[in-house]
């Protein structure tokens, strides 16, 4: 191994990753959710494990294989994801890639709603913000990284989220194009020092770059 590879080892470090959507039930067969394939988050978990980290991957409902040597915890709802994240602490770093549903249905129906008998008026209540909770927690990982999926004013919204959620870095994700479910991603790294513009890259390359940056930061 080269000197650079040794320097970039994450051996002995525990890194927590959230990925995928959450599903918030309406009734036993219907749910509300954000669009998310989980692929970017799974690629990040894989890249971290390849650098020797112990990785806990808290995954919402996705159809992806578990990367080698990654501890995967499957959840469905945002509240289950929040509980799984809390249970996985302490961690040296956390990368919150999940597209968490911002609201859940206040009263889920025990039986399937039948169309035609009613127009369901769904009362929604806010879900916990898992990243912001972690940012304000005494168990906050030393390096806390969020994602921001934006369709406009990408860098402005990302910078605001970095401060509001007490994150060290925000990976600003421009989802105005055809990112969802695809192979490539356009992201920029927003830190306290400013913005690093990254070119459009395969999701595996975004993951590798981010994992290298995490290894450097945890040295
Ligand atoms: N996040 C979270 N828990 C939530 C909502 C978001 O942990 N309930 C995390 C995401 O995993 C991501 C970051 O917060 O790392 C930003 O998520 P995003 O949806 O872009 O921002 P929101 O704060 O939810 O604002 P909005 O959706 O209105 O843009
Ligand atoms: Ca959101």
Image (cartoon, helix red, strand yellow):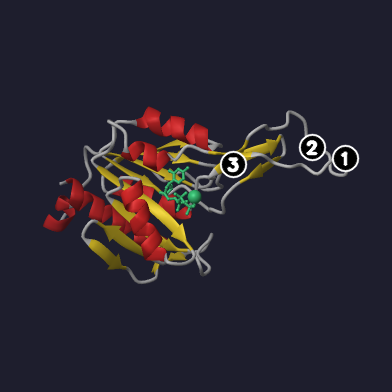
Give the camera-side residue of 6 and 38: 38
Crowding at label 3, few (<14), some or many (≥20) Cα neighbours within 10 Å? many
Residue at (84%, 43%) from the top-left corner? Answer: 115
| Cβ atoms at labels 1 and 2 below 8 Å apart | yes
In the displayed image of the protein, which residue is found farthest to the bottom? 199
Give the camera-side residue of 56 and 161: 161
- The answer to whether one can see residue 74 in this image is no
Count of numbered labels shown in the rendering = 3
Q: Left or right of 24: which side holds 141?
A: left
**Which of marks 2 and 3 precedes in the sequence?**
3
Q: Quadrant of residue 190?
A: bottom left
| Residue 161 coordinates in the image, percent (x, y) | 37, 52
Q: In this view, does 85 lie above or below 189?
A: above
Q: Left or right of 12: which side holds 85?
A: right
Secondary structure at numbered mark 2 = loop
Separation of marks 3 and 2 at Cα, in angstroms: 17 Å
Give the camera-side residue of 72 and 75: 75
Residue at (53%, 45%) from the top-left corner? Answer: 102
Secondary structure at numbered mark 1 = loop
Crowding at label 2, few (<14), some or many (≥20) Cα neighbours within 10 Å? some
- Would you name the residue on which mark 1 appears? 117
| Residue 170 coordinates in the image, percent (x, y) | 34, 54
- Would you name the residue on which mark 2 appears? 113
Q: Left or right of 164: which side holds 216?
A: left
| Residue 42 coordinates in the image, percent (x, y) | 43, 49
- The answer to whether one can see residue 128 in this image is yes
| Cβ atoms at labels 3 and 2 below 8 Å apart | no
Separation of marks 1 and 3 at Cα, in angstroms: 25 Å
- Would you name the residue on which mark 3 appears? 23
Q: In this view, does 84 lie above or below 122?
A: above
Residue at (59%, 47%) from the top-left corner? Answer: 33
């Amino acid at each position: 191994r080269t000197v650079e590879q040794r320097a970039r080892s994450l051996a002995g470090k525990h890194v927590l990753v959230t990925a995928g959507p959450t599903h918030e039930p309406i009734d036993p067969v219907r749910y509300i959710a954000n669009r998310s394939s989980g692929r970017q988050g799974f690629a990040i978990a894989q890249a971290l494990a390849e650098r020797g980290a112990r990785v806990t991957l808290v995954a919402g409902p996705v159809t992806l294989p578990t990367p080698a040597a990654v501890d995967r915890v499957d959840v469905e709802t945002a509240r289950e994801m929040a509980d799984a994240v809390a249970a996985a602490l302490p961690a040296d770093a956390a990368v919150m890639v999940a597209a968490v549903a911002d609201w859940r249905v206040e009263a889920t129906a025990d039986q399937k709603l039948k169309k035609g008998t009613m127009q369901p008026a769904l009362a929604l209540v806010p879900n916990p913000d898992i990243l912001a909770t972690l940012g304000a927690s005494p168990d906050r990982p030393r390096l806390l990284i969020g994602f921001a999926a934006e369709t406009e004013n990408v860098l402005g919204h990302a910078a605001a989220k970095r401060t509001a959620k007490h994150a060290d870095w925000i990976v600003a994700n421009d989802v105005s194009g055809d990112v969802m479910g695809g192979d490539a991603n356009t992201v920029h790294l927003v830190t306290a020092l400013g913005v690093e513009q990254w070119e459009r890259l395969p999701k595996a390359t975004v993951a590798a770059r981010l994992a290298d940056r995490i290894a450097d930061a945890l040295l």
